Amino acid sequence: MNDSSDVEYCLVSKDLLEDRLISAKAKAMYALLCSYPVGTDRSIKVLAEKLGMRRELASRLITELEDYGYVERTRIRGPDGRHYITDYRIYPQSKL
């Protein structure tokens, strides 16, 4: 039997799962975003690699989630002043 303290999981909004306007791939992206703690590298490159897709598709899926009010994306200038870090705010229900 597995020790439950070793199990890692995340909660995904039932509202999002049942939203027929959101594609299955966007729902997978949402679940992946939910699974990363704040402060973890959630760059498009990393997200795309985790889901086995091109960066362009990963970006479009996040845009889909933004368009329907489930995710907000904010670019923050990194410590070096030249590069940006993307911060995601994830909502359990659409903000629309």
Image: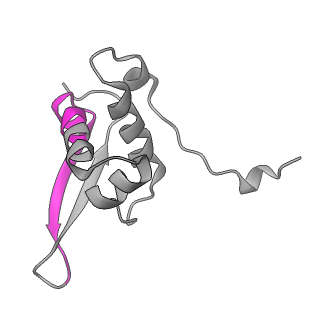
Measuring from the top left, give residue 92's x and y in whole percent. Answer: 38, 33
Measuring from the top left, give residue 67's x and y in whole percent. Answer: 16, 31
Which portion, as a residue range, is magenta?
62-79
Instruction: Look at the picture and state if 11 lies above or below 85.
Output: above
Relative to 57, is 3 on the left or the right? Answer: right
Quadrant where the C terminus is found in the figure: top left
Instruction: Look at the picture and state if 92 lies above or below 87.
Output: above
Relative to 41, is 79 on the left or the right? Answer: left
Residue at left offset 70%, top offset 51%: 7
Instruction: Look at the picture and state if 34 lies above or below 19.
Output: below
Relative to 5, is 69 on the left or the right? Answer: left
Measuring from the top left, give residue 3's x and y in whole percent. Answer: 82, 52
Q: How many marks?
A: 0
Measuring from the top left, give residue 83's x and y in whole percent. Answer: 15, 75
Residue 43 visible in this rendered orientation of the protein: no
Residue at left offset 24%, top offset 42%: 57
Instruction: Look at the picture and state if 43 lies above or below 77.
Output: above
Residue at left offset 48%, top offset 49%: 35
